[in-house]
Image (spheres, helix red, strand yellow):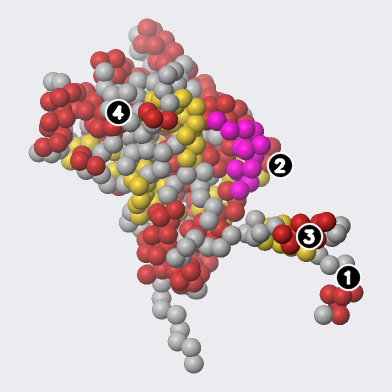
Amino acid sequence: MADLLGTPPRVVTAGVDLFAAALSAQAVPVTPVDWRPPMPGTAHDLARVLADPRRPEANARAVSRMLAATADLVDVRPAREVLGLQPGEFLHAGPPLTWDRASGPMRGALVGAMLFEGLAGSPDEAESLLARGSGIELAPCHDRGGVGPMAGVVSPSMWLFELRDDVHGGTSWCSLNEGLGAVLRYGAYGPEVIDRLRWMADVLGPALQAAVRRRGRVDVKGIVAQMVQMGDEGHNRNRAGTLMLLRDLLPDLVESGLPSSDVAEVARFVSGNDHFFLNLVMPAGKLQTAAAAGIPGSSVVTTMARNGTDFGVQLSGTGGQWFTAPANTPSGLYLGGYGPDDTNPDIGDSTITETMGLGGFAMASAPAIVRFVGGTVPDALATSRLMYEITLAENPAYAFPILEFRGAPTGIDVTLVARTGILPQINTGIAGRVAGTGQVGAGLVQPPAACFTAALAALAATTPPLPALK
């Protein structure tokens, strides 16, 4: 007490600002703190998880494995070869889903995949077969070790990027990016969509396979590290990453022996699609987060994904169990005459970029992204700084120059989410809610809090019982 009265007072305030305002009016320095109580109903679960003696070591191990993960592009192959998919088997984005609960863009993408595979002759016939379900199997991409953008629908004849993490022995995959607008992943299935998918299967996929096999591995993690310092955040902006990938593959593509017209068409398609590299960032993120999965006691989030109906998360300490809640609807900037009424709830596995510390977490590295998703440059800087509040580490491989090369906020901790009430920030494309529409815009969205509180409760149920008080 004597020390307290012998030095100038230092005042920190939280909550209502009446006390701070009164002191400031008397010229007393005040430091306001943006504090809020834990999410409602989480106090007991937080106490159980925070008291778990396994947690500090488990989280340190999870984060260490995340940061050490590598990601090399090793091949480009059809899904039937990579995954053994058979006709009638389809993978999709987000947590498990059935046709009767599928949103418009998810239904549209499944209809398009049926047409592409020749399993139906018309959209009506495809819908009828999908609704009947006979001979049809749906499963999440994540449950097969991969990721799919937006609807994320993968069928046997689609080609996939195949990536490997040699440090932990992991393998992941993602489909090839189709571009923007009326594309399958946004739920469009018109003739131009199906024709493009056939060209991708007949020309683009084999050409990329020839180039990768001729060149050898491509260090995707190395490209991601460079693109983050060149103004890309890896989710909605992949311009630098796309051009660096093309720079690496083009010489071997030219010397592959393919017809020059095919080479020119492939180069034109890739260079004209600034999102092409997104489909390599995503499996790189899957390898990073999968390396941290399945560690008992760990409260690190390893998956955030949405299927257009539900948002789902997974924790390291609870393995492959999904925790879901209704997906929120993004808001942002819209294409053409589209508006908020045309928007479908959040959809896609591309939130793996936020789970790995990029995307909405890395908006500070890509101020130009605000012109695509809405918001301001100060918003972008503030958002990245805020995400450090709910993460356990910084990834030095993905450094933000504008934040003095601070590493990407990595390792979302569900206890920090529950204690602070801060939800992960996601920037995303926006799909039209009516099947067949395609993309209607791009914007910002947050996950439903209920996913995290449910995951926390499940993790708490796995903790050792607290010792009895004597």
At 68% from the left edge and 41% from the top edge, which residue is drawn? 403
Question: In what element is the residue under mark 2?
Answer: loop
Tell me the mark number nearer the camera, choosing from 1 and 2.
1
At 13% from the left edge and 39% from the top edge, which residue is drawn? 133
Q: How far apart are marks 1 and 3 (CA)?
A: 21 Å
What residue sits right under mark 3 in the picture?
22
Which mark sits nearer the N-terminus, 2 or 3?
3
Which mark sits nearer the N-terminus, 1 or 2?
1
Is residue 122 among the parts visible in the rendering?
yes
Q: How far apart are marks 3 and 4 (CA)?
A: 54 Å
What residue sits right under mark 4 in the picture?
434
Are circles 1 and 3 on residues that touch, CB within 8 Å?
no
Callout 2: 10 Å neighbours few (<14), some, many (20+)?
few
Q: Which mark is residue 198?
A: none
Tell me the mark number nearer the camera, choosing from 4 and 2.
4
Quarter of the picture holding the N terminus: bottom right
Tell me the mark number nearer the camera, choosing from 1 and 3.
3
Which mark sits nearer the N-terminus, 1 or 3?
1
Q: Residue 404 carries which label?
A: 2
Q: In this view, does 11 lie above or below 155?
A: below
Callout 1: 10 Å neighbours few (<14), some, many (20+)?
few
